[in-house]
Every structure is written in C-alpha cells, then in structure tokens.
Image: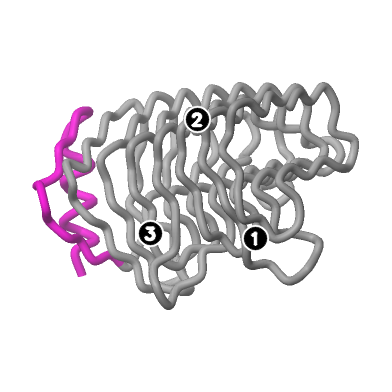
Amino acid sequence: DDTACLQALVNGSEKVVLPRGRTFHITKAIIVRGPKALNGNGATISVSSHIPAVAVSGAGAEIYGLTLIGMNGATDGFFLDRGASNVTIRDNRILGGWREGILFGRPGQQSLKFLRNTIRPLEGTVLSYGILGNPYMQGREGPPPRDIVIRGNHITDVSSDAIELNSPKGTTISDVDIVKNKLSAPHHVSPAAGFCIGMAGAKRVLVFENMISDFRWQAVHVEDDSSQIVI
C-alpha cells in the first residue's frame, strides 16, 4: 500500500514531480489541494477498491502526465471536490474499470479545463462515463459549475456516455466548450444512455469539430430544458 508515501510526495511542495515509471498502489484517494502543479512524469496510480484515485480541491491545481488504472469497482479517476476551481486536468491516461473517468459538479466550481486526456477501458473492465458533470449527485448548496473546456480528449469504448452534462432543474451547468474530442459509446443497452455527448438542462454549450463514431443510440443527445446549444 503506497497511499501514505504518495500523499507525502504530493504534499511536499507546490510543484511536484513524481518518479518516472513508478507504480503506486493506493487504498485511499490521493488529495491534491490547489494551488499545486502535479507532474505525473509517466508514473502510474493503481486502484482496486471502491475509491477515486485523485480528489482535487481548492483553486489553481494543474495535473498532467499521470496514468490511472482502475479495476472494476473503482469510482472516479479524477474527482473534483467542493471548492475546486481554476483546475486543469491535461495529458493524462485514465484506463480500466471506472464509474467515471472524470467527475465534476460540486457547487461553485468554475474555470475547469479537461484537455487531451485518454480515457478508455482495458480488456475485461467496464468504463461507464468518460467525463461526467452531475450537480444532482454533488449537492445543490451554491452556484452550479460554469466556464468549462473539454478539448482534445480521446474517450472511447464507454458503456454509458463519453461526455455527459446532467443538470436537473436549479443546477444548470453553463458555458461549456466541447471541442475536438474523439468519442465512442457503443455498449449501453438502454436508450437512457449510450451517447457520445449528452446534455440535460445545460446552458450555453458549444459542440464543435468532434470526431464521433460507434455510438449505441445518439451521437449528441439534448434534453430537459437545455438552451443556447450550438452544434
């Protein structure tokens, strides 16, 4: 169990570089509190229990160069906790069995960037969602997330939705750019999922120049009071 060792490395300074090629096996989520730059440097975090790999809180975190491997039952590759803003998650690999590759939606989150990440299952694993914004799951105390860029990610072979903005009434995710992603979602058996891009109740969303293929139901699915959507 490398949890304590890895957490100590992450806590060590505002600019952290992990040992190249090292694999860390963890049993609790690694907490990254902004402001902090975490360079994974090709290191791997392996999760085999029902936890997120990395939980991000505070303002000003940037995380890049990590590989996250989850076995079936792991929750989130990256979980953005309350207070996470001005966060950049870029150039990472999120592989294997996850409920969500990246989960955001806590009240007050803003200025989030998810750039050039690879999110896909491995053989024998199930990846449900690639990137999921879901304020309903995250609580409603405070303004919903806004100012989000999802660009240049490869999210493939998912079982639910590759990118989903799920905003029940009163929790509208807004001002989102979904641009130049490569997406596929071929597996879901119910018409309630299996979209490459899904949005419910979202506002001011741009869907532009994505490569969308091999979806189970719709390439882009828009419902539930979504408004000001440009595709």
From mark 3 to mark 2, how far is it between C-alphas?
A: 18 Å
Three-letter amino acid code at disc 1? Ser
**Residue 201 on the magenta span:** no
From mark 1 to mark 3, how far is it between C-alphas?
A: 15 Å
Q: Residue at x 9, y 47 (%)?
A: 19
**Residue 16 on the magenta span:** yes
**Mark toward the start of the polypeptide (1 vs 3):** 3
Helix, strand or loop for disc 1: loop
Picture coordinates of residue 30 (x, y %)?
32, 52
Picture coordinates of residue 71 (x, y %)?
39, 72
Chain part drawn in magenta = 1-26
Question: Residue at label 1?
Answer: 160
Q: Residue at x 17, y 60 (%)?
A: 23
Q: Which quarter shows the N terminus?
A: bottom left
Picture coordinates of residue 52 (x, y %)?
43, 58
76 up-or-down from 208: above or below: below
Picture coordinates of residue 143 (x, y %)?
71, 28
Question: Residue at label 2?
Answer: 151
73 up-or-down from 219: above or below: below
Three-letter amino acid code at disc 3? Leu
Q: Residue at x 39, y 67 (%)?
A: 122
Three-letter amino acid code at disc 2? Arg
